[in-house]
Amino acid sequence: MSIKGISEANLKCRSDTYLLTPGYFTEDDPIRLELVKAWYRNATFLVIDPKFICRSLRRLRWSTNLKPAQFIKRFEIKVRIGGETFEQEEFAERLQLLRHFHGTCPIVTIVLENLVENMYDGHGAQACAQHAAYTFPVLLSLHRLRFKLIVRSELNLKFVVVSEETTVEEWTKKFHEAIESPRAQAFLQEVERKALASMRRRGR
């Protein structure tokens, strides 16, 4: 099944999803409906493009007799920092579209997928924070709607968005602490080792 709004990984994340299909229980069976609601509340939806989420959810067989958007509480969305203006606008728009789910006070994890790339290109913590600053207005807007927003990346970085800490200065501190941790330094060294090995192979 091709799903634009959410990742197909969502369909494979649980081994017991057969219990949710209308064929296992009758469509209006209270047990099935409660199981489906619990699945939507506890599953993390990997968002590709928020404007297609509702349409995608309606295509899931176990959405029958329900409005899934009323129950979803967990999203994960990948965001790139820096880039061209049009790319920043596109990512900001995707984040902003999540506001339609504010009724469940959802938890949204924002994955900074190119923080390592920025570090490897020689950008320090402050430059990375400046590259991420275009997301601040949207994050603050969602925060006011009672979203819980978590920022993370592969560099041992994970923190909850707080309005008074959503500044370049505060994010610089968070990025610096994450980058300087032994785990992050080991990760960067491994990335560099693999890059050098790849260059040597291409040079043969």
Image (spheres, helix red, strand yellow):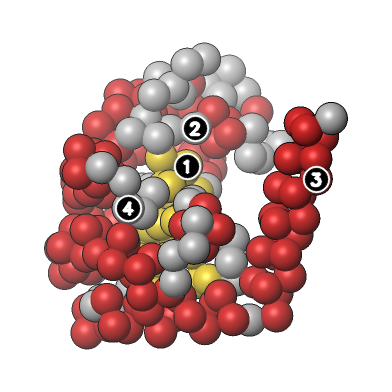
**98 to the left or right of 152:** left
Q: What residue type is disc 3 on?
A: Ala
Between discs 3 and 1, the one toward the N terminus: 1
Q: Which residue is mark 2?
A: 7
Q: Which residue is mark 1?
A: 46
Please name the residue shown 22% across and 84% down the image: 164
- Helix, strand or loop at mark 4: loop
Q: What residue type is disc 1 on?
A: Leu
Q: What residue type is disc 2 on?
A: Ser
Q: What residue type is disc 4 on?
A: Gly
**Residue 127 lies in what quarter of the image?**
bottom left
Between discs 4 and 2, the one toward the N terminus: 2
- Helix, strand or loop at mark 2: loop
Which residue is most to the top? Answer: 1
Please state which of residues 64 and 155 is positioned toward the viewer in this rendering.
Answer: 155
Residue 98 picture location, percent across and down: 25, 47
**Residue 156 lies in what quarter of the image?**
bottom right
173 w.r.t. 37: above or below: below
- Which of labels 4 and 2 is toward the front? 4
Instruction: Determine the CA span between mark 3 and mark 4.
Output: 27 Å
Please name the residue shown 49% across and 32% down the image: 7
61 w.r.t. 171: above or below: above
Residue 32 picture location, percent across and down: 52, 35
- Which of labels 3 and 4 is toward the front? 3
Q: Which residue is mark 3?
A: 197
Q: Identify the disc placed on residue 82.
A: 4
- Which of labels 3 and 2 is toward the front? 3
Please name the residue shown 66% across and 64% down the image: 188
